[in-house]
Image (cartoon, rainbow, N blue to C red):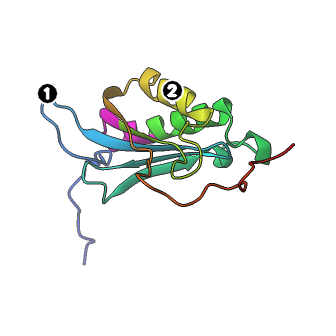
Amino acid sequence: MAPKRSAPTTEEPQRLGPVLREGEQCYGVVHLYASFNDTFIHVTDLSGRETLVRRTGGMEVKADRDESSPYAAMMAAQKVAERLKELGVTAIHIKLRATGGNKTKTPGPGAQSAMRALARSGLKVGRIQDVTPIPTDGTRKKGGRRGRRL
């Protein structure tokens, strides 16, 4: 018996992400947490339930002291943007968060450079929002009654 002939198949490259019409944007939400020890870039869908990509400054550099540096944040943001383009995300909303609470409300050194790298990579930036937790009446600050004495 002769072997069966299979119909010639044309393999299309597998496309990830949603199917968009012309001029339509696919949004993702970038949760950017910049402390003075590290910078986290976590991208989700609009609901926040599905994680698309997650990178940190510590994943990009070897030395512990460089995790929060602007260079590490920029490298992480470039890798995130590259992955988002593979997934078909064309636009982002940015939610920036500092440590907050009864600690510092100022974002770390990697926040600015990460946002710049995301914007320069070709992703359209929708909204930038600061979601740092601000206590209305929190717990006692570290350092005692007379503060930290040097």
Q: Are marks 2 and 1 in contact (CB under 8 Å)?
A: no
Q: In the displayed orientation, state which residue is furthest to the top.
A: 120
State the SS at label 2: helix
Quadrant location of the N terminus in the rendered image: bottom left
Quadrant containing the C terminus is: top right
State which tag comes first along the sequence, 2 or 1: 1
**Distance CA(mark 2)–CA(mark 1):** 26 Å
Residue 14 location, x and y as percent?
31, 49
On whether residue 59 falls in the magenta region, the answer is no
Residue displayed at 72% across by 42% down:
61
Other residues around mark 1 within 10 Å, as few (<14) / some (14–19) / many (≥20):
few
Q: Residue 131 in the image: state x and y as whole percent.
A: 39, 43
Which residue is tagged 1?
Answer: 22
Say if 72 sits above or below 5 in the image.
above
Q: Residues within 10 Å of mark 2 (few under 14, many from 20)?
A: many
Is residue 92 toward the left or the right of residue 118 in the image?
A: left
Which residue range is magenta in the image? 83-93
Residue 149 position in % (x across, y down) = 83, 45
Q: Secondary structure at mark 1?
A: loop
What residue sits 66% from the left and 30% below the top? 71
Depth check, mark 2 against mark 1: the one in front is 2
Spot the residue most to the front.
145
Q: Amino acid at mark 1?
A: Glu
Q: What residue did someone put label 2 on?
A: 117
Does residue 90 show up magenta in the picture? yes
Q: Is residue 8 above or below residue 119?
A: below
